[in-house]
Image (spheres, grey):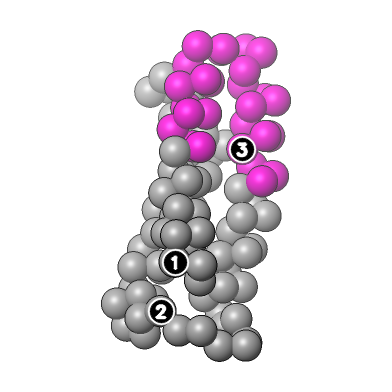
Amino acid sequence: MISLLKKPSAWIPIALSLGIIAMLIFYLTRFGIVHNEDEGTAAHLFQFWLVLEAVMIPFFALRWLPQAPKDAALVLLLQIAAVLAPVAPVFYFHL
């Protein structure tokens, strides 16, 4: 699994998720929960990130599951968990 995590298609989705978590924490600590008609930059970055994740995770799965199913499945679970971490507060707070 460690050798597979060195591949960019494995660690980039995880790094993007960590970046979005940092952005959410920064935004919530700086501005709190704000309900505006205009979504703002943070919401647009979040939406762009979701599109990137929706492309990158299936790419990783299609590329590596046939070659290394056990290791790729573990990395895939890690990627999915990393995606759910920033999505959960957004759905919880209805931001």
Name which residue type carries label 1. Phe
Whether tag 1 and tag 3 are in contact, CB under 8 A, the answer is no
Q: Residues within 10 Å of mark 2 (few under 14, many from 20)?
A: few
Decide if residue 6 is in sight here. no
Name which residue type carries label 3. Ile
Residue 64 sits inside the magenta stretch: yes
Name which residue type carries label 2. Ile
**Where 17 sits versus 33, above or below?**
above
- Please identify the quadrant where the N terminus is shown: top left
Instruction: Specify whether 32 is left or right of 47.
Output: left
* Mark 1 vs 2, N-terminal side: 2
* Mark 1 vs 3, N-terminal side: 3
Callout 3: SS: helix
Report how far apart the C-alphas of labels 1 and 3 lie in the structure: 25 Å
Q: Quadrant of residue 38?
A: bottom right
Residue 71 sits inside the magenta stretch: yes
Residue 57: assigned label: 3
Whether tag 1 and tag 2 are in contact, CB under 8 A, the answer is yes
Report how far apart the C-alphas of labels 1 and 2 lie in the structure: 8 Å
Residue hosting label 2: 33
Residue 28 x, y percent position in the rendering: 35, 75
Instruction: Specify whether 29 is left or right of 59.
Output: left
Residue 93 x, y percent position in the rendering: 44, 66
Callout 1: SS: helix
User: Which mark lies nearer to you, 2 or 3?
Assistant: 2
Q: Residues within 10 Å of mark 3 (few under 14, many from 20)?
A: many
* Mark 2 vs 3, N-terminal side: 2
User: Which mark lies nearer to you, 1 or 3?
Assistant: 1
Q: Residue at x 49, y 46 (%)?
A: 83
Q: Which residues are magenta?
A: 54-80
Report how far apart the C-alphas of labels 2 and 3 lie in the structure: 29 Å
Residue hosting label 1: 93
